Amino acid sequence: MIYRPTYYYTLLLITLLMSSCQSELPMVSLGIDETYHIARMQKLLLQPAFTGHQYRWSTADGRLLSTDRDYIFLSDKEGRHNLVLDIIDDETPYHHEFTVNVMHEEIEYSPYISHVYEYRPAPGQFINEMPKYEPGDTEASMAQKAEDCISGKNDIMISLGAYGGYVTFGFDHTVINVPGEKDFRIWGNAFYELLNPEKKGGSCEPGIVWVSYDTNCNGLPDDPWYELAGSHYYNMHTKHNYALTYHAPDPDRKIYSQGPFINDVEYIRWTDSNDSTGYIHRNTFHSQDYYPKWLDEQSYTLSGSCLPRNAYDTSGNGTYYILQSFDWGYVDNHPNDLADLNSFDISWAVDNDGNKVHLPGVDFIRVQTGINQYCGWIGETSTELSKAADLHINTGPIIPPDPLE
C-alpha cells in the first residue's frame, strides 16, 4: 500500500435560507470546526464551496497567506496557528476565525526516500542491470526495484541512462522550503580526476532536478513540475523545451565496430527536436540489452532541458576523457563528500519560462540525465544516484562501531 502523506480536509459551506417572513437574503454558515489538528509537514486542504468575489486567507495578526479560493495550510512549526478566512462579496460577505494545531507526528518521519513513483531511464550501458531486469518485469516492478535500491537507508546505485532518463521519488512527508537554507541532498557517484582534482573534472554526469508540490492533494506526481535552476540554466548553450526520441534497435541494421571497444556503432538511434540524429553505441564492456526490456514501445520520447556538453578528450585519440563538473545545482556532478554541492534549495525553482516560483514545499522530486553526449569507449553520459535525504529531518547520531565486535 502506498503511503499517502496528505490529509484531506474540506470546508463545507451550507446556505440556510431564512423563512419568507424574514429577509430573503441567505445566511451563510461555513459549517466547520473551530479547531483542526494536523501533523507537522502534512497539508491541510481548505476548499470553501461558497463562491465570493474575492478570498483572503490570513493569520490572526493580518499577514496575508493567499488570495486563492482554495488554500493549503502547511507548517513545520508545532503549536497553535490562528487563521482567518474572509470571503469578500457584496451580497454574502463572511469572516471566519479558526485554529490549526500543528502536532509532532505519531511515527517519526524518515529523512530518506520512502517511495519511487516512476523509473523511466533512457537506453544505456547500465540499463537492465542497475537495477536488474528479469523476464516478466513491468514498468511498475522496475520502479519497485528502483525503490528497493534507493529508499530508506539503502544505498544501491541506479542508472538513468542517456539524456532524459529519469526517476521520480518522494518522502513520507512534504519537504519544507526553509528560507535561506538548502532543503534536500542527493548522492551520486561523481569523482574528480586524481592528477588535477583542483580542476573539479573527472567523471561528472550532471542530472537536472525537478520538483512538484501536490496541489491537488491526491498523492500522485501529476501536478506541475518546476526545474531547479542550477548554475548552467541560463547558459547560452543550454537548450530548454528539448525533446529526444529513442528508437529500439533495428534487427536488420548493419553491425560494425569502431576501434577495439565499440562493437555496434549504430545500435540505438535517436532523433531530437532540433532535427539532429545520432546513436548510442554498444561497447565490449556491457553485453546486455541497452534498450529497457520492460518497454513494449518501439520508440519513446524524453524531454526537458539539455545542458551543454562537458566532456573533452585530453588524449587526442579518444582514450582519456574528462567530464567537467558544473558549478552547482546538479546531481552526480561533484563527489559525495562535498555535501553542500550535492544539496538543493527549493527556492531555485523556475517555471517553463524561467520565472522564479515560490513553493512552500515539495512532495515529489525528479532527477533526469541532463546531457546528450557520448564519450567513446566510456559510453554515454548517464546520471546515477543512490539515495536522497531531507536536510530538515534529523538523521540521528552516528554511532561508531564497537571495536570488540
Image (spheres, rainbow, N blue to C red):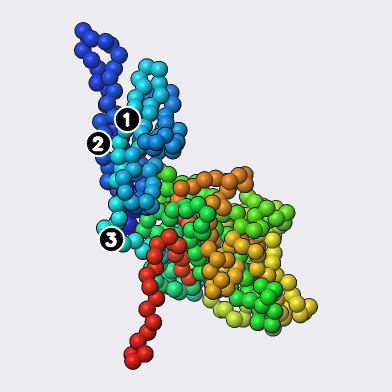
Q: Residue at x 62, y 81 (%)?
A: 284
User: Which residue is labeled 3 in the image?
Assistant: 107
Using the image, tell me which numbered label, if any, was put on residue 96.
Answer: 1
Tell me which numbered mark, 3 or 1, is placed earlier along the sequence: 1
The amino acid beneath tag 3 is: Ile
**Residue furthest out toward the right:** 316
Which sits in the foreground, 260 or 401? Answer: 401
Residue 312 shows in the view:
yes
Position of the N terminus, as image quadrant, is: bottom left
Q: Estimate how packed mark 1 is, as few (under 14), some (14 to 19) or many (20 or more) residues with alpha carbons within 10 Å.
A: some
The amino acid beneath tag 2 is: Asp
Q: Residue at x 46, y 48 (%)?
A: 360
Q: Is residue 325 above or below residue 84?
A: below
Residue 382 shows in the view:
no
Which sits in the foreground, 77 or 302? Answer: 77
Using the image, tell me which numbered label, if any, was put on residue 9.
Answer: none
Which sits in the foreground, 164 or 200? Answer: 200
Tell me which numbered mark, 3 or 2, is placed earlier along the sequence: 2
User: Which residue is labeled 2 in the image?
Assistant: 33
Tell me which numbered mark, 2 or 1, is placed earlier along the sequence: 2
Q: Residue at x 40, y 51 (%)?
A: 220
Q: Secondary structure at mark 1?
A: strand
Rendering coords of residue 287 (x, y %):
56, 79
Q: How far apart are labels 2 and 1 at the CA level?
A: 11 Å
Picture quarter containing residue 169? bottom left
The amino acid beneath tag 1 is: His
Q: Secondary structure at mark 3?
A: loop
Q: How far apart are labels 3 and 1 at the CA level?
A: 32 Å
Q: Estimate how packed mark 3 is, as few (under 14), some (14 to 19) or many (20 or more) residues with alpha carbons within 10 Å.
A: few
